[in-house]
Image (cartoon, rainbow, N blue to C red):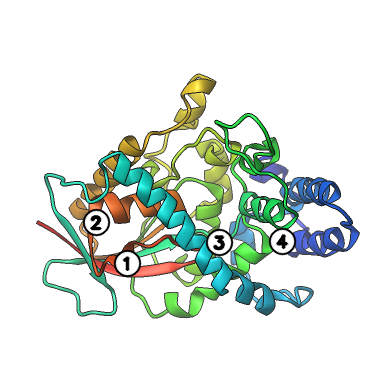
Amino acid sequence: MPTADALHPCSPMAKSMQLSKGAFIMVGYAGGLITCFLLLQSRWRQHATPVAQVLGSNQKEYPEFKSLEHLQTCLSSDAAKASAAADGALNRARLQEAGLLGKTWPVRVVCIAGTKPRPPGAKTLHFIRHGQGFHNSLADFCLLYNIRRRYSHQAEGLNPYNIAENFDPPLTEIGRQQAKALQPYARTTRPEMVVVSPMNRALMTSNIAFAHMLKAGIPWIAHEGCREKSHGNACDYRRTATELAAEFPNVNFSNVQEQDPWLSRPEGERTETDASQAARAYDFMLWIRDRPETEIVVSTHSAWLFSVFNTVLQCQPASLAEWFQNGELRTVHVTFT
C-alpha cells in the first residue's frame, strides 16, 4: 500500500470522481460493476492527494459531480431510514441476547439531546459516523444488483467487506461530500478536542467536517477505544500509525500502536465479541470523563456507536440510541455519576 510520500502530488482528489463517472457509464452487469469498483478504488489510492494537502486549500464543490443532491436524497430516503432501522433492530436483538442491552456499569453515564441546555458538570459530545466508504459502496452495489452477500462466518456468497482492496478503505466521493455537508453545523460548535478512530474513513470525515478547526490549536487525538468493531474483515483493519500520521499530520497518534493489534492475531481470532466492544466503549467514555475538555468531537463508526449508545449510555429519550447513518452527526450532553 503506498505511503503518503508515494502518492502522486499533482493529482487532485477529484481524480477519483472522474473515474467514478466513467466507471458507472461502462458498467453493464453486476460482475463488471464490481470489477470497475475495485479498479476505481485501486486508482484512487494511487492518485489521491494527501488529505492535509487538499484541506490546505479552499474547499469548493466538485463541478463534475452533478447528481450529489439526488444521491444524498436517496441516502436519506425512507428506504435508507428503514435499512438503518433494520440494522438497529438486528443489533439490538443480539445485544439483548448477550445481556448487554442497558448494562449496568460502575459509573452511570446519562445522555440527553444536545438541543437541550447542558446540565451542570455535563460534557457536550458531537458523535459522527464516517461518510460513505468504498466498503459501504460495494455493499450497496451488491444489494442493488441482487448479489448474494455474506459475512465471514458464512460459506457462500460475496462478502463485500472482506475484499483485499477494502483494507482500511477511504471515503468515496459521496462520503467526502457527506462530510462536507456537516461543515455548516460544525462551524456553530466550539469543540476543544477532536477524538478520532485511527481508521482512514473516520480520519477523513473529521478532517473534512471540521476543516475550520485544523489550525485552531486544539488537540486531535487518534484513539483505539473508538475504532470499529472487528468482524475479521479487510475493512476492519487499519494501516500503520506511521502511514496514517504522514497523511494526517494534524492528528496525534502517540497512543496508537504502530501495527494494528488485530492483525497480529491468528486469522480465526480476529472477531471482537460484543462484550469486548461494550467494555472498550465504557473505558473510552471514562477516558472522556477524565479529560479537561467539556466539548468534544468523536469521529467513529456505526457498530461502535450503536454499542456505546445502547450498552453504556442511558439515553433520554431512547430514540437517541438508534442506528447512525453514514455521515450523520448527533450532539448529546453526557453526565457521569
Nearest to viewer (mark 4 / mark 3): 3
Q: On the rendered image, what quadrant is the C terminus found in?
A: bottom left
Check if mark 4's residue and mark 3's residue have beta carbons within 8 Å: no
307 or 205, which lies in front? Answer: 307
Is 61 on the left-hand or right-hand side of 90?
right
Judge depth for marks 1 and 4 and give the one in front: 1
> Does residue 61 appear in this view?
no
Q: Residue at x 12, y 66 (%)?
A: 121
- Report the quarter where the N terminus lies: top right
Q: What residue sits right under mark 3 in the picture?
A: 131
Residue 46, horizontal then vertical, whole percent: 76, 46
Horizontal side of residue 32 vs 224, given as left or right: right
Amino acid type of the residue tagged 4 in the rendering? Met
Q: CA distance from mark 4 to mark 3?
A: 16 Å
Which residue was labeled with disc 1? 320
Q: Which residue is mark 4?
A: 13
Sequence-earlier tag: 4 or 3: 4
Marks 1/4: CA–CA distance: 34 Å
* Image coords of residue 58 (percent x, y): 62, 75
For the residue marked with disc 2, what is the amino acid? Leu
Q: Earlier in the sequence, mark 3 or mark 1?
A: 3
Of badges 3 and 2, the one in the foreground is 2
Q: Position of residue 40 (x, y in %)?
A: 78, 51
Residue 166, placed above or below residue 186: above
- Say which residue label 2 marks: 313
The alpha-carbon separation of the residues under discs 2 and 4 comes to 38 Å
Element assignment for label 3: loop
